[in-house]
Amino acid sequence: MIVAERKPLDEIIDLLRPYEKVLVLGCGSCVTVCLTGGEKQAQELASQLNLAAGGRDMTLHADFDCITRQCDREFIDNLEKQPQNYDAVLSIACGVGVGFMSELYPDIPLLPGLNTTFYGANTAPGTWKEYCHGCGDCVLGWTGGICPIAKCSKSLINGTCGGTHDGKCEVSDELDCVWYLIYERLAELDRLDQYRTMRRPRDWGLNRSGGPRRLTHQEVMELEEEDSNA
């Protein structure tokens, strides 16, 4: 899941200062699970903004709404409050939702209320850890399911580096060396041959270095075209 945290209230208020009527728009997927962008958080943030505006010499009124996902067009019709009726929309979805909604409503300022941080999993109550970097060329098949791109401080594809010490990363004694963990995991699986194999350099064109990425299922597009021509 995508993990995000809310921007500081002062930063949000600075973003909203030019506007009087604002819609705080929540998202019911990833950011709801990580307790930063769901319906409850949208309602709470709208209330905080209305209270804060009174003490900051601002003419601001904030309403709230929430849909299942801001990154899928099919859920936009579920909006109870229409963005075009507001001076601006403060989205507390991840950056994907903000960007997608900006395309759907090009005449309305779509402002981010969250900082998107990483792809992660819930490992304990109130705790999420990064597990994936979205590099476009998954290596988990030969690293024992442990991602060196996301978890190695240097994103090394062939480890370990010379900075590891007693299984810890040179960046911090509190960080496990991920290549040490990979070694231990592959040893348990009796697959150390995977560790000893020198891997080719990463294809950075599959990462963000190649520009914005796109996933297309041609068969789905063809079915849609057939349905529209039927």
Image (tube, grey):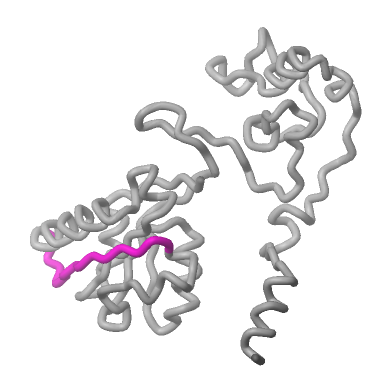
In the depicted structure, whether residue 205 falls above or below residue 71: above
Give the quadrant of residue 144: top right
Residue at x-position 48% and y-position 59%: 95
Q: Which residue occupies the extreme front position in the image?
A: 230
In the depicted structure, whether residue 136 falls above or below residue 53: above
* Residues rendered magenta in the picture: 56-69
Residue at x-position 63% and y-position 43%: 133
Q: Position of residue 74 (x, y in %)?
A: 46, 72
Q: Which residue occupies the extreme bottom position in the image?
A: 229
Q: Position of residue 171 (x, y in %)?
A: 60, 23
Q: Which residue occupies the extreme top position in the image?
A: 166
Q: Which residue occupies the extreme left position in the image?
A: 54
Q: Position of residue 82 (x, y in %)?
A: 29, 79
Residue at x-position 50% and y-position 33%: 129
Q: Nearer the viewer, residue 177 or 83?
A: 83
Figure quadrant of the C terminus: bottom right
Q: Is residue 132 visible?
A: yes
In the depicted structure, whether residue 147 falls above or below residue 61: above
Q: Nearer the viewer, residue 212 or 35?
A: 35
For the image, the number of numbered tags is 0
Q: Describe residue 194's horizontal placement relative to residue 90 as left or right.
A: right
Q: Describe residue 63's horizontal placement relative to residue 148 as left or right.
A: left
Q: Nearer the viewer, residue 190 or 45?
A: 190
Q: Is residue 154 visible?
A: no
